[in-house]
Image (spheres, helix red, strand yellow):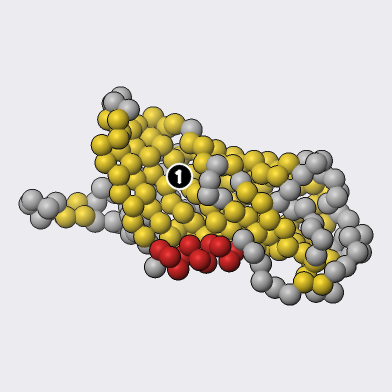
Amino acid sequence: MKKALLLFVFILQTPILLYAQKEVGVFPKSYWSSGGEWIFSAGTVEGYNNVLRWAPVFNVQNVLNFDKSQNFGWFTGVNVRNVGFIFDESPSIRKKVRTYNIGVPLGVKFGDLNNQFFFAGYELEWAVNYRERTFIDERRVDRFNVWFSDRVNNWQSSLFAGISLPGGTDIKLKYYLTEFFNRDFTVADPNTGVISRPYQDFRANVFTISLSFNVFKQGQFVVGE
């Protein structure tokens, strides 16, 4: 399963639609664009100390743009994103949690699409891999990695808004409407067999600020006519 997902991610980086050349200044036009993303994230966690998390990898954005005019367009695509947060359970115990998500955005962009413009939209993401690491006094004592884990909500909804600056630098704010953890998740104690819900009272929504470059920039080829 892991190898199949890695192959799928590789395919996402190279759109396989048929391309046809078209002049850049002609509207309407449709084209693929892509780029990476540096994500700074935190969790809205009640009762715990929150620590800013930086995730420069592995984040890939593949955007299918539909520019209706010089000043308005909409977009969708397929993204792969590293989403998580860091929190302290106590002064000596720190947890780092994250999921790898495959997402499909739907958004609009408005302004001067060849210079500076705003964009906003909604994204639905599927959490395919969960990882948790535990540190005591800054030394890692535990780590596990689970595919399609029930510890987290597998389908996550989010809203985003941002600005694309002259030169192609993009700054985006994003808030996950879906809580990160599945508060109905149950686990049995291996010694006593007692069932517990470790995330029953753990409410956490992820908030991110990300930086990327030339994600909406049109390349040499566009889609169709």
Residue at the image point whose x is 67% and y is 63% from the top? 76
Along the line of sight, the residue nearer the viewer: 71 or 15: 15
Residue 152, percent from left and from top:
37, 54
Residue at the image point whose x is 59% and y is 54% from the top? 60
Residue 75 is left or right of residue 54, and the answer is right
Residue 44 is left or right of residue 114, and the answer is left
Residue 118 is left or right of residue 105, and the answer is right
The image quadrant of residue 75 is bottom right
Along the line of sight, the residue nearer the viewer: 186 or 36: 36
Residue at the image point whose x is 52% and y is 41% from the top? 55
Residue at the image point whose x is 48% and y is 36% from the top? 53
In the depicted structure, whether residue 120 falls above or below residue 64: above
In the depicted structure, whether residue 94 falls above or below residue 110: above
Regarding residue 89, the answer to whether it shows in the image is no
In the depicted structure, whether residue 160 falls above or below residue 63: above
Residue 204, percent from left and from top:
41, 44
Residue 208, percent from left and from top:
55, 42
Residue 95, percent from left and from top:
34, 37
* Residue at image mark 1: 84
Along the line of sight, the residue nearer the viewer: 208 or 224: 224
* Element class at badge 1: strand
For badge 1, the amino acid type reads Gly
Q: Quadrant of the C terminus?
A: bottom right
Regarding residue 128, the answer to whether it shows in the image is yes
Q: Residue furthest left?
A: 192
